[in-house]
Amino acid sequence: MKILVCISRTPDTTAKIAFTDNNTKFATDGVQWIINPYDEWYALVRAIELKEKDASVIIHLITVGNSETEPIIRKALALGGDEAIRVNTDNQDPFYIASQIAAVVKEGGYDLVLTGKETIDYNGSSIGAMVAELTDTNYISLATKFEFEHGKAIICREIEGGEEVAETTLPLTLSCQKGMAEARIPNMRGIMAARTKPLKVIDPVTVDTYTETVGFLLPPPKAGVKLIPADTPELLVKLLREEAKVI
Amino acid sequence: MNMSILIYTEHQEGKFKKNSLEAISYGVAIAAQKGIDAHALVIGETTAPLPELGKYGVKKVYHLNTANINISDTKTMSVLIASVSTQQNCDTLIFSNTLSAKGIAPRVAVRLKAGMVSGAVDLPENNNGFCVKKNVFSGKAVTEIKVLTSKIVITLNANAFEVKETGGSAEVITIDISAPASTITVTGINKIAGEIPLSEAEKVVSGGRGLKGPENWGLIEELASLLGAATACSRAVSDAHWRPHHEHVGQTGLAISPNLYIAVGISGAIQHLAGVNRSKTIVVINKDPEAPFFKAADYGIVGDAFEVMPKIIQAVKDLG
Ligand SMILES: Cc1cc2nc3c(=O)[nH]c(=O)nc-3n(C[C@H](O)[C@H](O)[C@H](O)COP(=O)(O)OP(=O)(O)OC[C@H]3O[C@@H](n4cnc5c(N)ncnc54)[C@H](O)[C@@H]3O)c2cc1C
């Protein structure tokens, strides 16, 4: 089985969210970058688990981004994976990014493409489905389990108010979330090995851009908390009914 | 012929989903901006009253009721939805940003060569092209996305637009398109009975590590059931297996924006706030007056949850 894991770079979860250039660009000063948690904890680690069970599994990682994303790719390679591909572009349009990944999938003949359920910065949850459409494969979103036995893929996915189990065959594209795998930390051997693993940089294929980012806004600050004395919680209930009108 | 707007409308057990009705009201409002019509698309057999969708302002309801549609197959669904929109001259498609739409809408967008905005939170603005606001950075900011294509796909976040009834009845048009053969077989569905799905809930009662252990969740569940609310928890709680994973909200869990979010014994770490700070009214109950959550709250009680919660529960019961 040949697996392609999509890796995205996102600001650390504690990063200060601010904007520059008249609110058109994310302020990157002092920002720590991480592998998008869903890509790392679930998509990548599940791929590594599959390889641990079956040494013939090949894992490639892909990132669509400029050279600033390379430390993150190395970090991912330190966890596992045989080699990585970086498509060199700054374009952020989901369709553009998905088209780059799809081109690599077609060229490389991957059986399984894994993404995280969404990035924690763009929150689009759309790349996996777009890649699946562009490569004409089945797609299951929000997968919490993936098993592959005797040519059959068994997948659990979250649905409203529960879970659905489905069977299909490869090739397949999945977006992964909690349940898929347990997060790991890279060990020293992995970090050393990552330095020499191949990281191939390729140029983007030519495709249209469907959307562009105009600017950003921060939510208006809250007016301030109204504190209710602990010995009169019934006042809270009254305020929720009469003032906030939410119960 | 004028283009129109098509809203994909989900149904379950003979009822339209409330989030889909929000999407319809949103689509109807965009149609009004553009001076065109909005129509609904319903797929699969249902006892839900199709003409009644007219009271939310759609003119037609396209009902695609071909036998054997595998609604769990994103490929099948996107072929069907894209075909109807092309056949019926709809250039803008609206979905509610539900768990199932996350699998389908991006495929439809690719099929139609449409620019997509996922998780829209407001009506489009047309001063400088077609621009839609969406949440980014897990709710910590909003971005404006300009769609450069003539066809557009938007998924609307739950609770971001109010359902509006205008009165009227829609013409129901049955459509028959053969569904492509599916290669996905659903072998089981485990529904958690009687629970309000968190992603659809208007009210949420959520517990953190301050509740000390799973045995104390009766306090959260009783208040939730009295209010008709869903239950949620912090990541620390789901990591400790006190509560199931699907209840975990925050930056790396589910992002929600209910009308009411009550946080009990949750500190309000930045990653937790990211997923819930879009809630309209936030109530925090925490014994530590310095808990960061109070800064993001509308109402707060500094006190011990084990003393405060029973009194709140009683007060809600007294409301009748
Ligand atoms: C990459 C990353 C991603 C993360 N993503 C998420 C996420 O998506 N969601 C999330 O929730 N967390 C997330 N976290 C974890 C987050 O940082 C916090 O650790 C977590 O939210 C803490 O959970 P808590 O508030 O329940 O527990 P604690 O921080 O332990 O807080 C417990 C609170 O309960 C109060 N308390 C104690 N006893 C009582 C009592 N008797 N009555 C009333 N109050 C009481 C305390 O004062 C305290 O404020 C993430 C962390 C990282 C590093």
Image: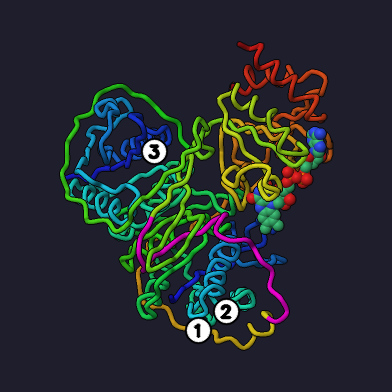
Q: Would you identify the image quadrant in which residue A210 lies?
A: bottom left
Q: Position of residue B46 (x, y in %)?
A: 28, 33
Quarter of the image with the N terminus of chain B in it: top left
The residue beneath circle 2 is A67
Quarter of the image with the C terminus of chain B in it: top right
**Are labels 1 and 2 assigned to the same chain?**
yes
The residue beneath circle 3 is B23
Disc 1 to disc 2, how far (Cα)?
9 Å
Q: Is residue B297 above or below residue A40?
A: above
Q: Amino acid at mark 1?
A: Val
The residue beneath circle 1 is A201
Give the chain of mark 3. B
Q: Is residue A51 left or right of residue B222?
A: left
- Region rendered in magenta: A167-189
Give the chain of mark 2. A
Q: Amino acid at mark 2?
A: Ser
Question: Helix, strand, or loop for circle 3?
Answer: helix
Q: Position of residue A82 (x, y in %)?
A: 54, 81
Q: Amino acid at mark 3?
A: Ala
Q: Is residue A166 left or right of residue B279?
A: left
Q: Position of residue B250 (x, y in %)?
A: 63, 47
Question: Helix, strand, or loop for circle 2?
Answer: helix
Question: Disc 1 or disc 2, which is closer to the eye?
Answer: 1
